[in-house]
Image: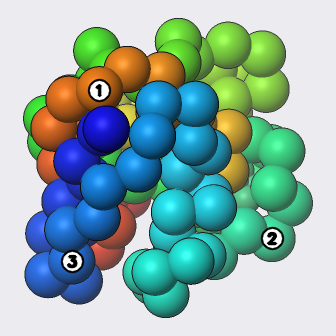
Amino acid sequence: MAKIVFVNDNKTVEVPAGTHLKKVIEDNSVGVYFPCGVGRCGSCMVKIVKGMEFLNEKAGDEKKTLEISGASDDKRLACVVVIEKDGEIVIETENVF
Ligand code: FES
């Protein structure tokens, strides 16, 4: 299982590898919203404080959107992130822009 800590919401959840981060956020009422849901609008940007190595690689529209917005390497677009491996992932969801 992967352990996910949402620091701003003071919530910790455990999910199996292969789970989409969007589902974890929606299931746990974390304050991130998904206007496009496909990595194009940038609204769901989060900061991965720890555990980037347990997530899928940035690619496609997510990579382009992050580059255009000048985001630092620790940023991800939560709508297209998949938790691929077991480990601890710490996520900030507020003031990440
Ligand atoms: S919801 Fe638009 S980029 Fe994630």
Ligand 1: give its quadrant: bottom right
Residue marked by disc 3? 11
Label 3 and label 2: CA atoms lie apart by 23 Å
Q: Position of residue 32 (x, y in %)?
A: 52, 74
Q: Position of residue 88 (x, y in %)?
A: 16, 38
Label 1 and label 2: CA atoms lie apart by 28 Å
Pointer 3 or 2: first along the chain: 3
Left or right of 61? Residue 71 is: left
State whether label 2 is within 8 Å of ligand 1.
yes
Residue marked by disc 2? 35
Residue 70, numbered circle: none
Residue marked by disc 1? 86
Q: Nearer the viewer, mark 1 or mark 3?
A: 1
Res 81 quadrant in image: top right
Left or right of 85? Residue 76 is: right
Pointer 1 or 3: first along the chain: 3
Determine the secondary structure under disc 2: loop
Q: Quadrant of the N terminus?
A: top left
